[in-house]
Image: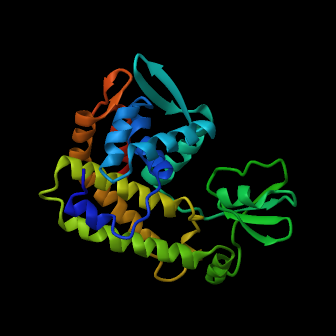
Amino acid sequence: MPRTPLIGTLTEDLTLTAGSFIVTIYGDIVVPRGEVLWMGSLIEICARLDISENLVRTAVSRLVSADRLEGERVGRRSYYRLAPSARAEFADAARLLYAPRDRANKWLLVFDADLPEDQARRARMAKVAPGLWISPDRADLPATHAPILRAEPVAGIDRLSELARFWDMDELHSRYRAMLDRFRPLADRLDDITPEDALIARLLLVHVYRSVVLRDPGLPEAALPEDWPGTEAQRLFRQLYLALSSNADRQIAAMMEGEAGPLSATTDRTTARLAALTT
């Protein structure tokens, strides 16, 4: 099924990989609705973005091999749910996307000469010297047994922005700007959007915003570069997500199935998610 004009505009020059987009589908749609999805529904929604059935099946197989998904057959149908190893990571991502985001005003110093750099990057920490890592105090301690100190500024507060150099803020700036350029026009096209386009547009919104916000260290306000676009991007994400959700949730109930039948349009978890976005 070809993309509609609206979806074609939103996906212009956007690279979508099947595995990454499936992760978005599970995080935004499936997790708050029982965590189980029929493979046929996954194939159908990916087809709306020209992701073929073969690519979906290959991506799901790889996600299973990577302990991200678990499969189960019921009769002739295959269903997939999140693997236990993926649930905590999904919960962390959901807090960044949907929960109120209070910027830290303290810092963590981690003294660990053996901390793998890929682990540090996933925790959005930055290396300031050999064996010394820094991150905003986001209330989630890094997974290490090394000493961790909590610090707060006592002087030079007007120069806190100099700490931003330890992260690639230029790349984040560009990604936020690209997200704003892609989705800002959508705000003027919401009055006549179809439920199907609302669902696909919301998934694309989550997919693009998630790819940026999971890299954002969440620096304190005083440490952010001037004209930081992340704040506007968060505001646009919340505005569009709330505006799209009534139609999108209706489409979920109409086209997507779990092991117990059609997915619910809303659940306690989806209602709580929307409430958090309004605060």
Q: Nearer the viewer, residue 188 or 109?
A: 188
Residue at left offset 25%, top offset 46%: 248
Q: Is residue 56 visible?
A: yes
Q: Is residue 75 above or below residue 64?
A: above
Question: In which quadrant of the rendered view does residue 268 lie?
Answer: top left
**Where is residue 273 shown, x and y percent of the image?**
38, 44
Residue at left offset 30%, top offset 34%: 256
The residue furthest top is 75
Residue at left offset 85%, top offset 52%: 146
What's the colour scheme? rainbow
**Where is residue 150 shown, x and y percent of the image?**
74, 59
Image-based side of 188 in relation to 232, left or right: left
**Where is residue 149 shown, x and y percent of the image?**
78, 58
**Where is residue 26 shown, x and y percent of the image?**
44, 41
Image-based side of 100 in relation to 205, left or right: right
Instruction: Please state the total of marks drawn on the protein image.
Output: 0
Residue at left offset 45%, top offset 53%: 97
Q: Is residue 123 visible?
A: no
Image-based side of 47 in relation to 26, left or right: left
Image-based side of 244 in relation to 60, left or right: left
